[in-house]
Amino acid sequence: MKLLLQNVKLVPGSEAYSTWLEPPAPIYVNFYFFNVTNVQQFVDGSGRPHVVERGPYVYRSIQNRTDVELINDGATLRYRLQKWYIFDANRSHGSEDDLITTVNIPLVVSHVLVTYFIPH
């Protein structure tokens, strides 16, 4: 049990720390979008949006932790995290050059709130 607890702590020299600092397996992030196919009808108010799911657009996430410090008597780790995303065309269903039109949800919600719920 003592050996197990030593290896799960994020302290220099532990297996967990090494894995946290440099993950042994690549990390991939998948993005999906809903492409509006009837933009003009939606914009002029004559129709609801018709959407088609697009994706996944797959990116490899590379993370670099630097300036790692143990503080508070080793109870806290402080570090700087840098991230890069590299497009993986082989895993993706689409290209970074694809044009996607989507609904700006915060704008639509704010319009609905102002139009229907805030007294004029």
Image: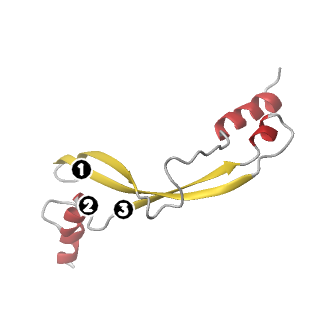
Q: Quadrant of residue 108?
A: top right
- Amino acid of disc 2: Trp
Residue density around tag 3, few if under 14, some if 14–19, many if 20 or more, within 10 Å: few
Q: Position of residue 70 (x, y in %)?
A: 17, 50
Marks 3 and 1, the one that precedes in the sequence? 3
- Amino acid of disc 3: Ile
Q: Can residue 71 be seen by looking at this rendering?
A: no
Q: Position of residue 117 (x, y in %)?
A: 80, 31
Q: 89 or 34: nearer the eye?
A: 89
- Residue at position x 21%, y 62% from top? 17
Task: Please name the residue that numbered disc 3 is placed on.
Answer: 27
Q: Quadrant of residue 32?
A: bottom right
Give the side of residue 94 with respect to residue 35, left or right: left
Marks 2 and 1, the one that precedes in the sequence? 2
What SS does tag 1 mark? strand
- Residue at position x 20%, y 47% from top? 66
Farthest residue in the top direction? 120
Residue 76: assigned label: none
What SS does tag 2 mark? helix
Q: 110 or 92: nearer the eye?
A: 92
62 relative to 90, above or below = above
Residue 20: assigned label: 2
- Amino acid of disc 1: Arg
